[in-house]
Image (tube, grey):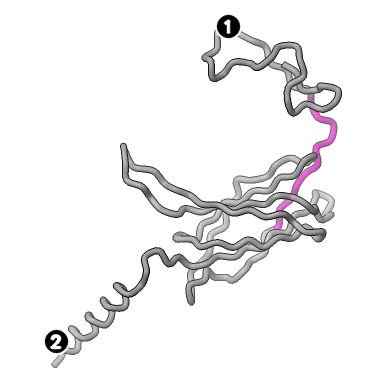
């Protein structure tokens, strides 16, 4: 009788596992609050988050494939992003013109329940620091460089410099 019960349990559990779609990934949702270093909201900042999606076999150890999504903050400096994730680990970043880009931070959800990562919709605070008194950047050609590292122009303003051409090579 015990063997029959174990076989039935095994059949039910195995059937449930086979019925699940392996592509079903729990949904994650994160809210970002973006402020300056003086606690003022930053409207119009681009926020992105990314996560591991799958692995592709190949040369050496294969390739990890990641997916990402992004959004723009509202007048209160807030944006909510959501996407499915296999692991529940997310990297995120923020950028806006006239501010230093921030990134390299991670958030790891604790567990998933009902196909949603928990805790549901945590708020993450990000600080964008304004660019004040930019430092002129110069480059000097020191011998022969590979073609991929060639300096685009000498003694001319570089793309991305301000009106005064503060960033020169």
Q: Where is residue 31, by image quadrant? A: bottom right
Q: Quadrant of the N terminus?
A: bottom left
| Secondary structure beneath label 2 | helix
Magenta range is 125-135
Side of 118 where 5 appears, left or right: left
Count of numbered tags? 2
Residue 142: image x %, image y %?
61, 8
Side of 20 where 111 appears, left or right: right
100 and 115: which is toward the camera:
115
Q: Neighbour class for label 2 at 10 Å: few (<14), some, many (≥20)?
A: few
Q: Neighbour class for label 1 at 10 Å: few (<14), some, many (≥20)?
A: few
Q: Does the magenta stretch mainly form a helix, a strand or a loop?
A: loop
Furthest residue to the bottom? 1
Residue 14: image x %, image y %?
26, 76
Q: Which residue is drawn at 77% across and 19% down?
A: 157
Kindly identify which residue carries mark 2. Answer: 3
Q: Which disc is residue 117 wearing? A: none
Magenta highlight on residue 13: no
Kindly identify which residue carries mark 1. Answer: 143
Q: Which residue is drawn at 77% across and 41% down?
A: 97
Q: Where is residue 145, by image quadrant? A: top right
Q: Which residue is drawn at 42% across and 46% down?
A: 64
Q: Which residue is drawn at 81% across and 30% down?
A: 134
| Secondary structure beneath label 1 | loop
Side of 165 where 24 appears, left or right: left
Q: Where is residue 158, by image quadrant? A: top right
* Mark closer to the chain start, 2 or 1: 2
């Amino acid at each position: 009788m015990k063997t029959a019960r174990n076989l039935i349990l095994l059949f039910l559990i195995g059937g449930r596992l086979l019925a699940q779609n392996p592509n079903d990934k729990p949904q994650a949702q994160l809210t970002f609050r973006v402020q300056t270093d003086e606690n003022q909201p930053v409207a119009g900042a681009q926020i992105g988050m990314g996560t591991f999606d799958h692995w592709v076999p190949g040369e050496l150890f294969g390739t990890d494939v990641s997916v990402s999504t992004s959004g723009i903050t509202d007048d209160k400096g807030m944006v909510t992003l959501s996407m499915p994730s296999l692991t529940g680990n997310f990297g995120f970043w923020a950028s806006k013109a006239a501010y230093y880009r921030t990134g390299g931070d991670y958030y790891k959800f604790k567990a998933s329940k009902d196909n949603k990562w928990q805790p549901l919709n945590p708020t993450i605070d990000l600080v964008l620091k304004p660019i004040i008194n930019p430092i002129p950047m110069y480059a000097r050609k020191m011998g022969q460089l590979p073609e991929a590292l060639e300096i685009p122009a000498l003694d001319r303003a570089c793309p991305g410099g301000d009106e005064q051409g503060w960033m020169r090579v």
